[in-house]
Every structure is written in structure tokens, then in C-alpha cells.
Amino acid sequence: MLTFDNNPAILQFNILQRYPEVIDFVTTRQHPDGSGADFNIGYKGGSHDDCVNNRLALCNAVGLGPEWMVFQNQVHGCNVHIVRKGDKAWGFYDKESAVQDNDVLVTNEPNTCLITRSADCIPVLLYSPDTKSCAAVHSGREGTYLGAAVEGAKALKANFGADYAQMIACIGPGICKDCYEVDCNCAAKFMEDNRFPSDTYTVKGDKVYLDLKRMIFYDLLTLGLVATNIEISDICTKCANDKFYSARSGDTQRFCAGICIRDY
């Protein structure tokens, strides 16, 4: 991953740099102005005013106004919301106005930034260059099992005619296969589902370690995306807890990932 305009506090996916019309970003703990390591984008783990100020600072750093932003009220599912004209600025100033009961935001509206928040769950950004449409997906354990990223890609095809073979997928920072420990009962449905090959989990006694990023990767390949069009971040939020929020490390704050298609 690259830094946003050489700002180490905000990252971008290498693969999306091919497309000048796309703005993408992944925030970290670090404030983009260098003032500290409490850049919380969620409404938990800090005051409401601090969250709003951080979101405004994000807007300033990436050159987007609050009116461009759309946030989701995530529920660890795979519900899709198509963001239409006039939906922008949902959830920026309060969680009540965010898109409710949603983990998959999809749009072809230009100048509309789709946001997904995370702290170990996997953010996934999708871009369809042939239709200039995009998606932001929150894919935790349940969302990965339900195929949230696949639902985002299907929505791009069904609503806008996107071609899977041209689609770009960015699987962002999240907990890694060596850190995501669950018990056997929790892991059973993954291990029994042939969607998830044996290299997506490791059994150690009565514990299982899940590789959510690789599960998402295989799901997207099965749908028809091309491996060379999928970028997987090697950043583990738990291993890099000094730079990212991690729920497994006890954090209640959130970083975020976003994608926007500019209208030149």
C-alpha cells in the first residue's frame, strides 16, 4: 500500500493508482496533520465532537467535502444499499442518519465517497472501471461467511452492468490468519463449507485460526474476478496495533476505508 500524497497517516491501494478518477484511502491511528495517534473515525471510543473533528480533518486531507461522504451502520451482514443521487452526507455528523443495517454500499454516482469502518474486520473496496461504479464493504467473520464482498460485486453487475473480469478488488488491513483465533464450534461452518479451501484455516488443538482475507479472495475468484485484479493488504491490525485500531486488542475506536469516483 502507498501513502496518500506522501502522508504516512493515510494509505492507498497500489492497484487503484491506475485510475486517476478514483480517490481511495485507508486511515490509521495517526492524525493526518501529525498531531497524535487518536484518529478515531467511529462514534465509539471517544467524544462525538472529537469524531466529527476527525472526520472533518479526513475530508481536508483527501480533498473531499462532508457532503460527499456516506457512512453505514454496520451489522455484520451482507445487506446492500444502492447510494443514489441525494444520499450523500449520510451519517457524517451522527450515526442515526447513516445507512441503517448495512455492510455493503454501492454507487455509480460521481463525487460520492462510500465509507466502511473497521477494527480487525476486513474493509473491501471494489471498482468497476468499465461502468465507473464502486462499492465499500465491511466484511467481518459473519460478513465473510455470508459473502458480503461477493454481494457488492454482484450489485455492481446487476445494477450497472459491471464486468467481473475487469473489476478491481482491494482487500484492506484487518486481522491476519495468525491472530484470528476462534473455537472449533465457531469455525465449524467455515470448515464444512467447500467455498473455503483448507488453506483458509489452521487447526491447533481446540482452536482454529481463520484467514478472512484469503476467504474473501477465493470467493471473489469463484465469482469471476481475476487474481491479478485483486490486491490484498498484508497489514494485520492486531500485529500493527500501534498503527491501527484492533478490537482483539481492546480498542473500541475505528479506522475507515473509503472510495470515491471523481467527476472531472
Image (cartoon, rainbow, N blue to C red):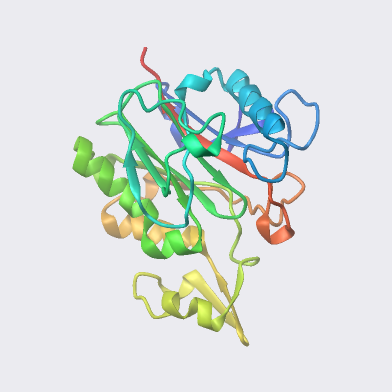
> How far across and how far down the image is residue 251, in percent?
72, 52
> Is residue 131 something that shows in the picture?
yes
Residue 201 at x, y percent in the picture? 51, 73
Inspect this view and state whether residue 165 appears.
no
Asked if residue 46 lies left or right of residue 254, the reply is right
Q: Is residue 46 left or right of residue 133?
A: right
Q: Nearer the viewer, residue 213 or 199?
A: 213
225 vs 18: above or below: below
Placement of the C terminus among the 4 image quadrants:
top left
The image shows residue 94, relative to residue 225, as above or below, that is above
Q: Nearer the viewer, residue 83 or 208?
A: 83
Residue 143's image quarter? bottom left
Residue drawn at x 61%, y 18% is: 60
Q: Nearer the viewer, residue 257 or 42?
A: 42
In the picture, measured across the screen, residue 254 lies left or right of residue 219, that is: right
The total of numbered circles placed on residues is 0
Residue at the image position 53 percent from the left and 46 percent from the top: 172
Q: Is residue 14 left or right of residue 248?
A: left
- Tell me where residue 146 sits by quadrant: bottom left
